[in-house]
Amino acid sequence: MTSQTFLGIDIAKRSFAAALLPTDGRCHHKSFDNTRDGFTQLLAWLRHHATDHLHAALEATGTYGDALALFLHQTGIRVSVVNPARIHAFAQSELSRTKTDKTDAALIARFVATQHPPAWTPPPPERRQLQSLVRRLESLQAMRQAEANRLELESAESVVAPGLREHLAHLDGQMEQLRRLITEHLRAHPSLQQHHELLMSIPGIGALTATKLLAELPGMEVLPSARQAAAHAGLTPRHRQSGTSVHGRSRIAKTGNARLRRALYMPAIVAMRANPLLREFAERLRAAGKAPRQIVCAVMRKLLHQAYGVLKHAQPFNPHHALTR
């Protein structure tokens, strides 16, 4: 039987800690810069330890680990990108008390050695480029809102107000340019454009939401069911019940892609009025005594199911067809 080696990576903005765990030896540790040069140094370090059959894993922590995960995949290394909640639960099962970059990397190495998470498949280049454009637009929008809030607090004779207005105008120009780039990118890739139009056929989903869903939702090869898509977004319900005495209110898990959840919130509000299926669904939940927040979360999940359905079947939304399913 071929021996396998496991690599745990604790990723941060500027650096990452690596823990190499052979099946029959002691754990090796080393830290690298979170740069292309650091990736190359990691690869040389791995080759020094003769790791022919390697399974690496790192947490899904925003954008910090995206470039490294792609690098490992492109060099032929099996890599898993794991929900941090799973790593946290694994640490609790080991009764772990020490938390450093080094111990976290070793924890991830032990996790991949015992749990064998599935391999990560990177999105195609056009999806990655769309994601970069959309995330940049979101960051500029957040920056603009913060600057607008500061401007509101300034008095009429403020000496910093002109600079704030100038910065707001600059941000407006950048955001407009990004919107044009996103539109051009969709037009340059017919499959993305087709998926964008399919998503917009769903009442409640507009052009911006459709773009965000395309940027953040993995393909069918990664998420083969609508239920898995909901879990990826952290929209699956978490029930709390134990015996006859504990009956906690159900809540969504919130252990998935927070950007997807944010993208679906306002469309769900709109869909409860404009989407006939979701309007009826929300009314049933109200009649059952569900809280407003629970209803919105349930509608977000159903809206994501509808989005997944039109993409999977490559057919525009049809409420009459859906009612007979």
Image (tube, rainbow, N blue to C red):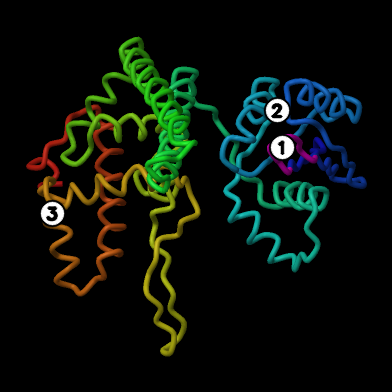
**Where does residue 253 sit, x and y in percent of width and height?**
45, 59
Secondary-structure class at tag 2: loop
Residue topped by disc 3: 279
| Among numbered discs 3 and 1, the one appearing first in the sequence | 1
Side (left or right) of 318 relative to 309: left
Residue found 42% across the figure and 21% down from its top:
174
Crowd band around label 1 with a 10 angstrom C-alpha radius: few (<14), some (14–19), many (20+): many
Looking at this rendering, what residue extends furthest in the top direction? 188
| Among numbered discs 2 and 3, the one appearing first in the sequence | 2
- Asked which quadrant contains residue 23, the reply is top right
Say if mark 1 contacts mark 2, CB within 8 Å. Answer: yes
Nearest the eye: 168 or 62:
168
Give the magenta-colored segment's residue range.
10-17
Report if residue 198 lies within the magenta region.
Answer: no
Give the number of the disc on residue 56.
1
- Kind of residue at disc 2: Ile
Residue topped by disc 2: 77
Residue found 30% across the figure and 44% down from its top:
304
- Locate the N terminus and report the quarter of the image it occupies: top right
| Among numbered discs 1 and 2, the one appearing first in the sequence | 1
Nearest the eye: 138 or 49:
138
Residue found 76% across the figure and 64% down from its top:
96
**Where does residue 100 sit, x and y in percent of width and height?**
80, 53
